[in-house]
Protein backbone atom coordinates (compact mmCIF):
# COMPACT_ATOMS: atom_id res chain seq x y z
CA UNK A 1 0.00 0.00 0.00
CA UNK A 2 2.92 2.31 0.67
CA UNK A 3 2.62 6.02 1.15
CA UNK A 4 -1.01 6.26 0.01
CA UNK A 5 -2.09 3.70 2.60
CA UNK A 6 -0.14 5.49 5.34
CA UNK A 7 -1.75 8.80 4.42
CA UNK A 8 -5.17 7.14 4.45
CA UNK A 9 -4.61 5.77 7.95
CA UNK A 10 -3.42 9.18 9.16
CA UNK A 11 -6.55 10.76 7.65
CA UNK A 12 -8.72 8.28 9.59
CA UNK A 13 -6.79 9.15 12.77
CA UNK A 14 -7.24 12.85 12.07
CA UNK A 15 -10.96 12.74 11.25
CA UNK A 16 -12.02 10.79 14.31
CA UNK A 17 -9.44 12.52 16.48
CA UNK A 18 -10.95 15.90 15.60
CA UNK A 19 -14.48 14.59 16.17
CA UNK A 20 -13.36 13.32 19.57
CA UNK A 21 -11.45 16.46 20.58
CA UNK A 22 -14.33 18.74 19.58
CA UNK A 23 -16.77 16.42 21.39
CA UNK A 24 -18.96 16.15 18.31
CA UNK A 25 -18.85 12.37 18.76
CA UNK A 26 -18.52 10.50 22.10
CA UNK A 27 -15.02 9.16 22.71
CA UNK A 28 -16.22 5.54 22.82
CA UNK A 29 -17.92 5.84 19.42
CA UNK A 30 -15.01 7.74 17.87
CA UNK A 31 -12.45 5.16 19.00
CA UNK A 32 -14.55 2.23 17.79
CA UNK A 33 -15.14 3.90 14.41
CA UNK A 34 -11.45 4.78 14.17
CA UNK A 35 -10.53 1.14 14.72
CA UNK A 36 -12.84 -0.05 11.95
CA UNK A 37 -11.70 2.75 9.62
CA UNK A 38 -8.01 1.96 10.14
CA UNK A 39 -8.67 -1.75 9.62
CA UNK A 40 -10.48 -1.08 6.33
CA UNK A 41 -7.89 1.39 5.00
CA UNK A 42 -5.09 -0.88 6.21
CA UNK A 43 -6.36 -3.71 4.03
CA UNK A 44 -7.86 -6.07 6.60
CA UNK A 45 -10.63 -8.30 5.31
CA UNK A 46 -14.14 -8.55 6.74
CA UNK A 47 -13.36 -11.80 8.56
CA UNK A 48 -10.26 -10.29 10.20
CA UNK A 49 -12.14 -7.14 11.18
CA UNK A 50 -14.91 -9.15 12.84
CA UNK A 51 -12.84 -11.85 14.52
CA UNK A 52 -9.63 -9.98 15.31
CA UNK A 53 -10.53 -6.32 15.73
CA UNK A 54 -14.00 -6.68 17.26
CA UNK A 55 -14.04 -10.09 18.96
CA UNK A 56 -10.43 -10.30 20.14
CA UNK A 57 -10.25 -6.55 20.70
CA UNK A 58 -13.20 -6.60 23.07
CA UNK A 59 -11.21 -8.70 25.54
CA UNK A 60 -7.77 -7.30 24.72
CA UNK A 61 -7.71 -5.35 27.99
CA UNK A 62 -9.67 -7.86 30.07
CA UNK A 63 -7.10 -7.85 32.88
CA UNK A 64 -7.43 -4.08 33.09
CA UNK A 65 -11.26 -4.36 33.16
CA UNK A 66 -11.11 -6.52 36.26
CA UNK A 67 -8.44 -4.41 37.94
CA UNK A 68 -10.46 -1.23 37.40
CA UNK A 69 -13.55 -2.95 38.81
CA UNK A 70 -11.72 -4.14 41.95
CA UNK A 71 -10.11 -0.74 42.35
CA UNK A 72 -13.50 0.95 42.10
CA UNK A 73 -14.86 -1.41 44.76
CA UNK A 74 -12.01 -0.39 47.07
CA UNK A 75 -12.79 3.27 46.41
CA UNK A 76 -16.47 2.67 47.13
CA UNK A 77 -15.85 1.02 50.49
CA UNK A 78 -13.37 3.71 51.51
CA UNK A 79 -16.07 6.26 50.76
CA UNK A 80 -18.88 4.30 52.50
CA UNK A 81 -16.96 3.63 55.70
CA UNK A 82 -15.93 7.25 56.23
CA UNK A 83 -12.22 6.48 55.85
CA UNK A 84 -11.77 9.09 53.11
CA UNK A 85 -13.47 11.81 55.15
CA UNK A 86 -11.45 10.90 58.24
CA UNK A 87 -8.18 11.22 56.28
CA UNK A 88 -9.14 14.74 55.18
CA UNK A 89 -10.35 15.74 58.65
CA UNK A 90 -7.19 14.41 60.30
CA UNK A 91 -5.01 16.31 57.83
CA UNK A 92 -6.86 19.56 58.55
CA UNK A 93 -6.62 19.04 62.32
CA UNK A 94 -2.90 18.25 62.20
CA UNK A 95 -2.21 21.51 60.39
CA UNK A 96 -3.83 23.60 63.11
CA UNK A 97 -3.97 27.31 62.26
CA UNK A 98 -1.01 27.24 59.87
CA UNK A 99 -2.55 27.63 56.42
CA UNK A 100 0.52 26.41 54.53
CA UNK A 101 0.85 23.27 56.66
CA UNK A 102 -2.89 22.60 56.33
CA UNK A 103 -2.71 22.96 52.54
CA UNK A 104 0.26 20.58 52.31
CA UNK A 105 -1.45 17.99 54.50
CA UNK A 106 -4.69 18.29 52.52
CA UNK A 107 -2.73 17.88 49.28
CA UNK A 108 -1.22 14.68 50.69
CA UNK A 109 -4.64 13.53 51.93
CA UNK A 110 -6.19 13.98 48.48
CA UNK A 111 -3.23 12.17 46.89
CA UNK A 112 -3.54 9.23 49.29
CA UNK A 113 -7.29 8.90 48.76
CA UNK A 114 -6.85 9.18 44.98
CA UNK A 115 -4.75 6.02 44.90
CA UNK A 116 -8.02 4.11 45.28
CA UNK A 117 -11.06 6.23 44.36
CA UNK A 118 -12.54 6.29 40.88
CA UNK A 119 -15.34 8.21 39.27
CA UNK A 120 -16.64 11.74 39.52
CA UNK A 121 -18.87 10.96 42.51
CA UNK A 122 -15.94 9.96 44.70
CA UNK A 123 -13.97 13.03 43.63
CA UNK A 124 -16.91 15.28 44.49
CA UNK A 125 -17.24 13.63 47.89
CA UNK A 126 -13.63 14.51 48.75
CA UNK A 127 -13.57 17.93 47.10
CA UNK A 128 -16.71 19.16 48.85
CA UNK A 129 -14.90 18.57 52.15
CA UNK A 130 -11.52 19.98 51.13
CA UNK A 131 -12.61 23.11 49.22
CA UNK A 132 -14.38 24.82 52.14
CA UNK A 133 -11.39 24.18 54.39
CA UNK A 134 -8.99 25.63 51.82
CA UNK A 135 -11.11 28.72 51.27
CA UNK A 136 -11.74 29.22 54.98
CA UNK A 137 -7.99 29.36 55.71
CA UNK A 138 -7.50 32.07 53.13
CA UNK A 139 -6.70 30.43 49.78
CA UNK A 140 -8.16 31.92 46.62
CA UNK A 141 -10.66 29.63 44.93
CA UNK A 142 -8.48 29.07 41.88
CA UNK A 143 -5.53 28.10 44.08
CA UNK A 144 -7.64 25.79 46.24
CA UNK A 145 -8.88 24.10 43.06
CA UNK A 146 -5.33 23.77 41.76
CA UNK A 147 -4.05 22.17 44.97
CA UNK A 148 -6.83 19.58 45.00
CA UNK A 149 -6.46 18.74 41.30
CA UNK A 150 -2.68 18.41 41.51
CA UNK A 151 -3.11 16.17 44.56
CA UNK A 152 -5.61 14.08 42.63
CA UNK A 153 -3.24 13.82 39.66
CA UNK A 154 -0.44 12.77 41.99
CA UNK A 155 -2.56 10.07 43.60
CA UNK A 156 -3.96 8.44 40.47
CA UNK A 157 -0.39 7.74 39.35
CA UNK A 158 -0.26 5.16 42.14
CA UNK A 159 -3.61 3.51 41.47
CA UNK A 160 -2.73 -0.15 40.76
CA UNK A 161 -5.72 -0.46 38.42
CA UNK A 162 -4.20 2.24 36.21
CA UNK A 163 -0.88 0.40 36.29
CA UNK A 164 -2.56 -2.70 34.88
CA UNK A 165 -4.17 -0.66 32.10
CA UNK A 166 -0.88 1.00 31.15
CA UNK A 167 0.87 -2.37 31.05
CA UNK A 168 -1.88 -4.05 29.00
CA UNK A 169 -1.98 -1.40 26.27
CA UNK A 170 1.27 -2.63 24.73
CA UNK A 171 1.77 -5.82 26.73
CA UNK A 172 4.66 -4.64 28.90
CA UNK A 173 5.43 -6.00 32.36
CA UNK A 174 3.73 -4.38 35.35
CA UNK A 175 7.12 -4.03 37.03
CA UNK A 176 8.24 -1.73 34.20
CA UNK A 177 5.34 0.60 34.93
CA UNK A 178 6.10 0.46 38.63
CA UNK A 179 9.77 1.44 38.36
CA UNK A 180 8.75 4.39 36.18
CA UNK A 181 5.90 5.47 38.49
CA UNK A 182 7.88 5.78 41.72
CA UNK A 183 10.37 8.50 40.67
CA UNK A 184 7.77 10.26 38.52
CA UNK A 185 5.34 10.26 41.43
CA UNK A 186 8.02 11.90 43.57
CA UNK A 187 8.37 14.58 40.88
CA UNK A 188 4.60 15.13 41.00
CA UNK A 189 4.82 15.58 44.78
CA UNK A 190 7.60 18.13 44.37
CA UNK A 191 5.52 19.95 41.74
CA UNK A 192 2.50 20.03 44.04
CA UNK A 193 4.49 21.41 46.95
CA UNK A 194 6.14 23.93 44.62
CA UNK A 195 2.69 25.09 43.49
CA UNK A 196 1.65 25.68 47.09
CA UNK A 197 4.89 27.56 47.80
CA UNK A 198 4.64 29.61 44.61
CA UNK A 199 1.05 30.67 45.23
CA UNK A 200 1.84 31.52 48.85
CA UNK A 201 4.76 33.75 47.84
CA UNK A 202 2.55 35.48 45.27
CA UNK A 203 0.19 36.48 48.04
CA UNK A 204 -2.69 34.23 46.94
CA UNK A 205 -3.41 33.39 50.55
CA UNK A 206 -4.59 35.63 53.34
CA UNK A 207 -2.57 35.93 56.53
CA UNK A 208 -5.50 34.94 58.72
CA UNK A 209 -8.34 32.47 58.53
CA UNK A 210 -11.00 33.73 56.15
CA UNK A 211 -14.47 34.31 57.53
CA UNK A 212 -16.54 33.79 54.43
CA UNK A 213 -16.67 30.35 52.84
CA UNK A 214 -20.44 30.06 52.70
CA UNK A 215 -20.49 29.82 48.92
CA UNK A 216 -18.28 26.75 48.88
CA UNK A 217 -20.26 24.18 50.81
CA UNK A 218 -19.67 24.23 54.57
CA UNK A 219 -16.97 25.97 56.57
CA UNK A 220 -14.22 23.96 58.20
CA UNK A 221 -15.86 24.29 61.65
CA UNK A 222 -19.20 23.12 60.28
CA UNK A 223 -17.57 20.12 58.65
CA UNK A 224 -15.95 19.15 61.94
CA UNK A 225 -19.30 19.44 63.71
CA UNK A 226 -21.17 17.50 61.01
CA UNK A 227 -18.62 14.72 60.70
CA UNK A 228 -17.99 12.98 64.00
CA UNK A 229 -16.13 9.92 62.85
CA UNK A 230 -15.62 6.72 64.80
CA UNK A 231 -13.10 5.41 62.26
CA UNK A 232 -9.95 4.16 64.05
CA UNK A 233 -6.66 5.72 62.99
CA UNK A 234 -5.22 2.41 61.79
CA UNK A 235 -8.05 2.12 59.24
CA UNK A 236 -6.63 5.12 57.37
CA UNK A 237 -4.00 2.84 55.84
CA UNK A 238 -6.66 1.22 53.63
CA UNK A 239 -6.27 3.39 50.48
CA UNK A 240 -2.51 2.86 50.21
CA UNK A 241 -2.37 -0.74 51.45
CA UNK A 242 -2.88 -2.24 47.95
CA UNK A 243 -0.17 0.07 46.57
CA UNK A 244 2.28 -1.07 49.23
CA UNK A 245 1.43 -4.71 48.57
CA UNK A 246 1.93 -4.36 44.80
CA UNK A 247 5.24 -2.56 45.34
CA UNK A 248 6.24 -5.45 47.60
CA UNK A 249 5.50 -7.91 44.79
CA UNK A 250 1.87 -8.93 45.30
CA UNK A 251 -0.39 -9.42 42.27
CA UNK A 252 -2.82 -6.53 41.84
CA UNK A 253 -6.15 -8.30 42.41
CA UNK A 254 -5.21 -9.98 45.72
CA UNK A 255 -3.82 -6.62 46.86
CA UNK A 256 -7.18 -4.98 46.16
CA UNK A 257 -9.03 -7.78 47.98
CA UNK A 258 -6.83 -7.29 51.05
CA UNK A 259 -7.46 -3.54 50.91
CA UNK A 260 -11.24 -4.01 50.65
CA UNK A 261 -11.40 -6.46 53.55
CA UNK A 262 -9.04 -4.34 55.63
CA UNK A 263 -11.24 -1.27 55.10
CA UNK A 264 -14.43 -3.17 55.93
CA UNK A 265 -13.03 -4.67 59.13
CA UNK A 266 -10.84 -1.89 60.55
CA UNK A 267 -13.27 0.96 59.87
CA UNK A 268 -15.33 -0.27 62.83
CA UNK A 269 -13.85 0.09 66.34
CA UNK A 270 -12.71 -3.00 68.18
CA UNK A 271 -14.28 -6.28 67.13
CA UNK A 272 -17.53 -4.74 65.91
CA UNK A 273 -16.93 -5.92 62.34
CA UNK A 274 -16.69 -9.54 63.51
CA UNK A 275 -19.60 -9.28 65.93
CA UNK A 276 -21.85 -8.15 63.09
CA UNK A 277 -20.28 -10.15 60.29
CA UNK A 278 -23.41 -10.10 58.15
CA UNK A 279 -23.39 -6.31 58.02
CA UNK A 280 -19.68 -6.28 57.22
CA UNK A 281 -20.10 -8.76 54.36
CA UNK A 282 -23.11 -6.85 53.05
CA UNK A 283 -20.96 -3.72 53.02
CA UNK A 284 -18.30 -5.52 50.98
CA UNK A 285 -20.96 -6.80 48.56
CA UNK A 286 -22.45 -3.33 48.17
CA UNK A 287 -18.98 -1.93 47.48
CA UNK A 288 -18.58 -4.34 44.56
CA UNK A 289 -22.00 -3.33 43.24
CA UNK A 290 -20.98 0.32 43.43
CA UNK A 291 -17.65 -0.57 41.86
CA UNK A 292 -19.37 -1.92 38.75
CA UNK A 293 -21.25 1.34 38.34
CA UNK A 294 -18.17 3.51 38.94
CA UNK A 295 -15.95 1.45 36.65
CA UNK A 296 -18.42 1.14 33.76
CA UNK A 297 -17.34 4.29 31.82
CA UNK A 298 -13.65 3.33 31.96
CA UNK A 299 -14.38 -0.27 30.97
CA UNK A 300 -16.46 0.88 28.00
CA UNK A 301 -13.53 3.00 26.81
CA UNK A 302 -11.20 0.03 27.25
CA UNK A 303 -13.35 -2.08 24.95
CA UNK A 304 -13.02 0.52 22.19
CA UNK A 305 -9.31 0.94 22.92
CA UNK A 306 -8.92 -2.83 22.57
CA UNK A 307 -10.47 -2.66 19.10
CA UNK A 308 -8.08 0.13 18.17
CA UNK A 309 -5.05 -1.74 19.45
CA UNK A 310 -5.97 -4.86 17.47
CA UNK A 311 -6.36 -2.73 14.35
CA UNK A 312 -3.02 -0.91 14.63
CA UNK A 313 -1.10 -4.03 15.67
CA UNK A 314 -2.33 -5.90 12.57
CA UNK A 315 0.68 -6.63 10.34
CA UNK A 316 -0.63 -4.86 7.21
CA UNK A 317 -1.31 -1.65 9.18
CA UNK A 318 2.02 -1.73 11.02
CA UNK A 319 3.93 -2.43 7.81
CA UNK A 320 2.18 0.45 6.06
CA UNK A 321 2.92 2.96 8.83
CA UNK A 322 6.49 1.92 9.67
CA UNK A 323 8.46 3.85 6.98
CA UNK A 324 6.66 7.13 7.65
CA UNK A 325 6.80 6.93 11.44
CA UNK A 326 10.48 6.04 11.47
CA UNK A 327 11.12 9.33 9.68
CA UNK A 328 9.13 11.25 12.30
CA UNK A 329 10.22 9.64 15.59
CA UNK A 330 13.81 10.60 16.56
CA UNK A 331 16.22 7.72 17.06
CA UNK A 332 18.44 9.94 19.19
CA UNK A 333 17.10 9.66 22.74
CA UNK A 334 17.92 13.27 23.63
CA UNK A 335 15.85 14.49 20.69
CA UNK A 336 13.17 11.92 21.52
CA UNK A 337 12.91 13.21 25.09
CA UNK A 338 12.90 16.84 23.98
CA UNK A 339 10.14 16.21 21.44
CA UNK A 340 7.80 14.44 23.85
CA UNK A 341 8.45 16.91 26.68
CA UNK A 342 7.48 19.78 24.38
CA UNK A 343 4.45 17.89 23.03
CA UNK A 344 3.17 16.66 26.43
CA UNK A 345 0.27 19.18 26.49
CA UNK A 346 -1.13 17.39 23.42
CA UNK A 347 -2.70 15.07 25.98
CA UNK A 348 -5.09 17.94 26.82
CA UNK A 349 -8.48 18.38 25.13
CA UNK A 350 -8.59 14.65 24.27
CA UNK A 351 -5.54 15.21 22.10
CA UNK A 352 -3.23 12.75 20.31
CA UNK A 353 -1.16 11.93 23.41
CA UNK A 354 -4.14 11.12 25.61
CA UNK A 355 -3.79 7.41 26.35
CA UNK A 356 -7.51 7.19 27.17
CA UNK A 357 -8.33 8.08 23.59
CA UNK A 358 -6.39 8.78 20.41
CA UNK A 359 -3.05 8.27 22.16
CA UNK A 360 -3.66 4.56 22.69
CA UNK A 361 -3.84 4.07 18.93
CA UNK A 362 -0.73 6.14 18.27
CA UNK A 363 1.44 4.32 20.80
CA UNK A 364 0.00 1.05 19.53
CA UNK A 365 1.27 1.87 16.05
CA UNK A 366 4.68 2.90 17.41
CA UNK A 367 4.97 -0.32 19.42
CA UNK A 368 3.83 -2.36 16.41
CA UNK A 369 6.64 -0.96 14.23
CA UNK A 370 9.28 -2.02 16.74
CA UNK A 371 9.81 0.92 19.10
CA UNK A 372 10.44 -0.36 22.63
CA UNK A 373 6.92 -0.82 24.07
CA UNK A 374 8.05 0.07 27.61
CA UNK A 375 9.62 3.29 26.33
CA UNK A 376 6.67 4.49 24.28
CA UNK A 377 4.07 3.42 26.87
CA UNK A 378 5.71 5.21 29.79
CA UNK A 379 6.31 8.23 27.55
CA UNK A 380 2.59 8.40 26.80
CA UNK A 381 1.73 7.88 30.47
CA UNK A 382 4.07 10.78 31.23
CA UNK A 383 1.88 13.00 29.05
CA UNK A 384 -1.10 11.92 31.15
CA UNK A 385 0.56 13.74 34.05
CA UNK A 386 -0.58 16.91 32.27
CA UNK A 387 -4.00 15.54 31.38
CA UNK A 388 -5.10 14.10 34.73
CA UNK A 389 -5.07 17.35 36.74
CA UNK A 390 -5.17 20.03 34.05
CA UNK A 391 -7.45 18.96 31.18
CA UNK A 392 -10.50 21.26 31.01
CA UNK A 393 -12.50 18.46 29.38
CA UNK A 394 -12.14 16.21 32.44
CA UNK A 395 -15.44 15.89 34.27
CA UNK A 396 -13.72 16.55 37.60
CA UNK A 397 -12.14 19.74 36.24
CA UNK A 398 -15.45 20.97 34.85
CA UNK A 399 -17.23 20.20 38.13
CA UNK A 400 -14.48 21.93 40.13
CA UNK A 401 -14.77 25.09 38.04
CA UNK A 402 -18.53 25.13 38.50
CA UNK A 403 -18.32 24.47 42.24
CA UNK A 404 -15.69 27.16 42.80
CA UNK A 405 -17.37 29.58 40.35
CA UNK A 406 -14.25 30.13 38.26
CA UNK A 407 -13.34 29.56 34.61
CA UNK A 408 -12.13 26.02 33.95
CA UNK A 409 -9.38 27.30 31.65
CA UNK A 410 -8.07 29.55 34.44
CA UNK A 411 -7.46 26.42 36.50
CA UNK A 412 -5.54 24.88 33.60
CA UNK A 413 -3.38 27.99 33.20
CA UNK A 414 -2.66 28.02 36.92
CA UNK A 415 -1.45 24.43 37.25
CA UNK A 416 -0.18 23.61 33.73
CA UNK A 417 3.48 24.59 34.31
CA UNK A 418 3.66 22.35 37.38
CA UNK A 419 1.89 19.42 35.70
CA UNK A 420 4.14 19.90 32.66
CA UNK A 421 7.19 19.66 34.92
CA UNK A 422 5.97 16.27 36.14
CA UNK A 423 5.39 15.12 32.56
CA UNK A 424 8.89 16.24 31.60
CA UNK A 425 10.46 14.31 34.46
CA UNK A 426 8.36 11.30 33.47
CA UNK A 427 9.70 11.39 29.91
CA UNK A 428 13.29 11.70 31.17
CA UNK A 429 12.78 8.75 33.54
CA UNK A 430 11.24 6.76 30.69
CA UNK A 431 14.21 7.42 28.40
CA UNK A 432 16.71 6.67 31.17
CA UNK A 433 15.06 3.35 32.06
CA UNK A 434 14.05 2.05 28.64
CA UNK A 435 15.71 4.13 25.93
CA UNK A 436 19.41 4.17 26.74
Image (cartoon, rainbow, N blue to C red):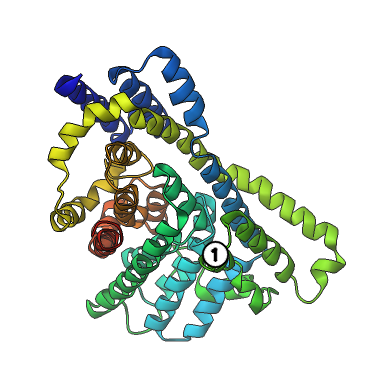
Q: Which residue of the protein is positioned furthest toward the bottom in this rendering?
A: 97
Q: At 16% from the left edge and 20% from the top edge, which residue is drawn?
A: 4
Task: Look at 25% across and 28% down and name the residue there.
Answer: 319
In the displayed structure image, the side of residue 180 where residue 12 appears, left or right: left
Q: Across the whole image, how many numbered discs are drawn on residues?
A: 1
Horizontal arrangement in the rendering, residue 279 relative to residue 69 (left or right): right
Q: Is residue 44 above or below residue 362?
A: above
Residue on which disc 1 sits: 249
**Which residue sits at x=42%, y=35%?**
305
Q: Nearer the viewer, residue 334 or 234?
A: 334
- Which quadrant of the view contains residue 315? top left
Q: Answer above or below: position of 54 versus 164.
A: above
In this view, which residue lies farthest toward the top? 46
- Residue 48 locus on image (x, y percent): 42, 18
Q: Residue 174: percent from the left, percent from the top? A: 46, 55
Q: Which one is in front, 305 or 138?
A: 305
Tell me where residue 367 sits by quadrant.
top left
Amino acid sequence: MGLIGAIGIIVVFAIFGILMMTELVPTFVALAAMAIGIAVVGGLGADQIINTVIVDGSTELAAAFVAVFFGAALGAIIEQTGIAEEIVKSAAELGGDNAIVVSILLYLAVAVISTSISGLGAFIMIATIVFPIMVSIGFQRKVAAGIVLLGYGNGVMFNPANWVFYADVTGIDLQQVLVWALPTGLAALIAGLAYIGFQTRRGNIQATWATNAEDVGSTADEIEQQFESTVPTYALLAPVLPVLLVVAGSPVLPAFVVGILYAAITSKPGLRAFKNMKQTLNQVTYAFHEGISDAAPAIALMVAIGWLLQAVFAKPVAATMEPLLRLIIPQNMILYAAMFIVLAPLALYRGPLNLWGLGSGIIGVLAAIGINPALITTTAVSALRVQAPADPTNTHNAWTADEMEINVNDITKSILPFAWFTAGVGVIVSVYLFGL
